[in-house]
Amino acid sequence: MSDIQLYLLEVDKNKAAAQTIAAGSAEKLEQKQLKLVNLITSLEEYINNKDDGALRAKSVAYLADVLEKVPPKVFSLQERRLLTDFVLGRIASDLEGIGASARALLALESLGKWDVDTAQKVMRTFMDHTHPLRQFKLQTERYPIIRLIDRLLATYRSGMKQLHEDDPEFMPGFISYFEGEKDPRNLMIVFSLLQVPMAEWDIHAYAHDMFDAVFNYFPITFKPPPDDPYGITAQDLKDRLRDCIAANSDFSPYAFPALLDKLDSTSMNTKRDVLHTLQACAVSYSANTVNLYSVTLWDALKFEIINVQEEDLAEEALKALALIADKLAPIDNALSAYLKPIVKECNEHLEDAPTKQSQGAGRIILAIARTNPTVADKVTKGILPVLFSLYGSSTSIAKRRGLLEVYNSLVQAHADLQASGHEVSVEGLQAFLDQAMTAMLHALARAPKPEVSFRLTAMNGLIQLISARKVLSPEQLGLAVSAVHDVVLHEQIEGHGNIRSEAIAALIEIAAAAPDAIRDQTVPAFMVELPDDAPDRATYRSALEAFAQLSHEQQIFDTVVLRLKNKLKAAQSRPESKELASDLLLAILYCFTNGSPMKEESGSIRSDYYTDYAEYMIQRLQDTSAPDVETSTAAIVGRLTNHILRQQTPHFQATVYNKDLEWLSPAKASGPDDATKRVRDYAPFALYYYAAVRPEIIDPQDIMTTLQTQAALLLNGEPDVVVRASVIRHLSLLINKFLEPKTLESSLQLGGIDVEALLSDHTDTTKSSISFAVLRAMMVQGKCGALTSRYIEALLRTLPEANKAFARNFVLLLSPDDILSKENHCIISGLYKQRAFSQLVKPINDRVRAAEASAKTNYLIAMSGVLQWLPYSVIESSLGDLMPALLQCMDLKDAGDQTVKYSTLVIFESVLMHDPAIVAEHARSLINRLLDATHGSPNEAKVRAKALRCLTLVPKQLKREAVVPYRRPVVKKLLSCLDDGKRNVRMEAVRCRSAWLALDEGTEEEE
């Protein structure tokens, strides 16, 4: 059988097999095993069958499939022409298989570009013989035709344009050709190809018809099916249609009236589409065209802003007005004609300020003014005379605030234009600058303090004036800056009327625009308020806190920290100023951790800061005799050192470490006593210092000696609470980051802190704490699986015999720690929480079932301590098994078990929100326990509130029939919660009771 016969047999029942046959024919043509003339001859019997149209269509489809698979250069130019003429000749006499004919022509064009005459012939053939396209009912037939026409318009632009110019009948036929098309795939291409004649041809005589052809589709209401394989969205179609409507200024007499008519629609989506299209028209149409309709557009668009229906519609209308202003900006007369009614109406609304209409007017002024320097200047000169006339004649603070808000908008528009690189005339602003400054300075300093919004508006206006370049004189700039920092330094108002935090934020913003003014005026003013000696913290603390916050602006960061350092030096020289020195240290630490220090090109903090600040403080620490070293000071210096040093290069760290080794490391001590003294004296500092250093630059001998000395101090000495806590955390750090995992067990034994040995005396709280610290480091690291499992098992064996304090230590195993972190170059396994769940929670849950009462309490406390740090996704799959144990956690009565209850309630809340079916079978037990947790001692307020929140979710998340039986007792018991002493508990009780009472309403409706 021939290929065509095989193809015809398979094409209806197995398209893939038919494609394979066509590919085989194409390969034969390429290998010269089949001649083109023979291929065409084999088609004759079927392609010319007068009685079977379907057979003819399949024959053309075979030819198209073959041509699509033939590689380039197989056919000569003459052969391609013959094939093109053959296909076009068929179209003139037979439209069966028209889609396949279009595919064949697309394939031929891909094999070699046509000349202009051929391209024109193809277009004429389709226009003459396939018009209108909707006569072909199948999308699969129309789609290739549309693709072919799109190819012709994209590739042969001049030839297609010539058809239009030579034949006055071409364009009407072309416009109506696609009429009635509804398929989204086809429309995407139709909207695209129509833009070629719309944008590039002279279609003035046909503009109305062409506009109608596309506007008939407006607005797009297409909703793609959920399984749409093509991914075409309604927004895609809207974007293409919008581009068509905005493609030619000749559409304006039809587009603007039609769009404004649609703007009256009650559909918010239609309104959005209209506004987006008006924006596109304002951008694409010529300025002269937009000028003809500018006032009409203003009259329609203003209502979307003055009388807001939806906020996003108002935003889009503002954008449209701004685009019109920007388009008209080069034509002075046109711009003036457009702005005149806008300025007039906005001024009228300002007379009634503050109203929604006046707020809308302010938004309009800002949106239009920020588009273009010329627009900003004209609007400013039109608005400000009226605005300040109204301001001067009014005594209403509310009205004055509304007017200042509009003024601020105008200044902001100037600042925004300057920020975008425009040169903006400030003449209009300066003409009324004295009135503006007087109004704002008076409002900020002398307005009644409860008038917070008025004062903040004035402060914002000063910020805007400072941000706008070349508006203020140096004297006016100084007055503005002084007014703001006076609020920070001299206003002592508690509660309503306190705007210090806003004033501090304003100073930071001003520092970005005018850093020199802050350096010259604000910084000295703060320095006056920060004494060298102050026995009472209340005299300086608020000023110090505010001054440290100025470090958020990078341009003045160095000034702020340098002044703080100078103050620190002065305070440190006076023994009676210890508190002040400590607070200044904290302020410097705040600056570096929360401010904006200068960075290296690599993005890390500049290394100079270590030399200038950390080294100075470390030297002070060294020079201070041991009894005088305060642990809090050592910790602050350590944290500052850590923040700067951990970001530095290995080379920089190595240089610093090798220098500090001599005085800090126990390995360099003169003897055991000196080594112990070093660990004790510098414990908080050393913790943060070693956390900052990269593991590869540390001397192994230093680490081992430090480990042994720290262990000896903990086990044999009696360090104070702070030193003990620091040393235990330091042990975790050394084990996680510096000790070799392969030799970890021997290192721990050598240091005397093998966990199994320590747990043999679990009643010793120090040994227990060390055990948990060691295990925590290993679990987070995740590199010593077997040893970690052994130690965990030892911990679990000890748990039933130990006291509650031991069980509560389980919370430490996974609790967040700023020392064991990736920022500190520690080893953090990505799966350590998952492993903790399988190694700790599951075994504990299994043992709870058979445990005696005393042991069960320990198990529940320990399990809760681990669970509270695990994400819901880790425990989700096992919640069904955990539910009995979690319910028993709610039965713990000791005051010390409130943390256990709270963390359990957090889990119940998540389960009720995400997987309520899990608790459905335990509904009665859960409800009773939640009710018990909502009342009195020993339940803390946060436990009561969380229990009420969970109880609120029960009737909402569980099936109605499961909770209705408990409705009345729950509602009755909740009455006492309404009188709880804590406001947040009462609020939760009201919500909870409402949720349960809603079940009554449901019952009444059913009855």
Image (cartoon, rainbow, N blue to C red):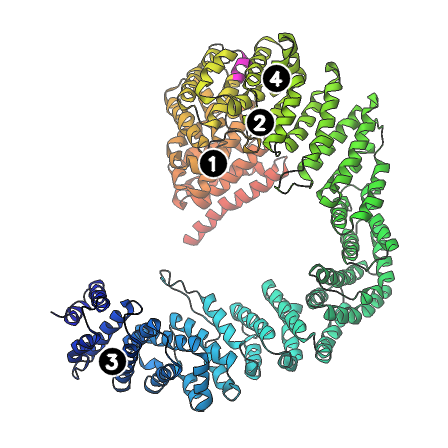
610 over 278 or under it: above or below: above
Q: Which mark is residue 681?
A: none
The residue lying at 35 percent from left, 60 percent from top is: 227
The residue pinned by badge 2 equals 937
Residue 169 placement, left or right of 353: left
> Where in the figure is residue 579, as x and y percent of width and height?
78, 26
Helix, strand, or loop for circle 1? Answer: loop
How far is disc 2 from disc 3 in space, using C-alphas? 88 Å
The part of the chain drawn in magenta is 764-770
Mark 3 or mark 4, earlier in chain:
3
Q: Are marks 4 and 2 in contact (CB under 8 Å)?
A: no
How far is disc 4 from disc 2 in space, using C-alphas? 34 Å
How far is disc 3 from disc 4 in space, using C-alphas? 92 Å
The residue pinned by badge 1 equals 871
> Where in the figure is residue 962, as x and y percent of width and height?
39, 42
Residue 283: name its quadrant: bottom right
The residue pinned by badge 3 equals 96
Mark 4 or mark 2, earlier in chain:
4
> Where in the figure is residue 880, as x and y percent of width and height?
38, 34
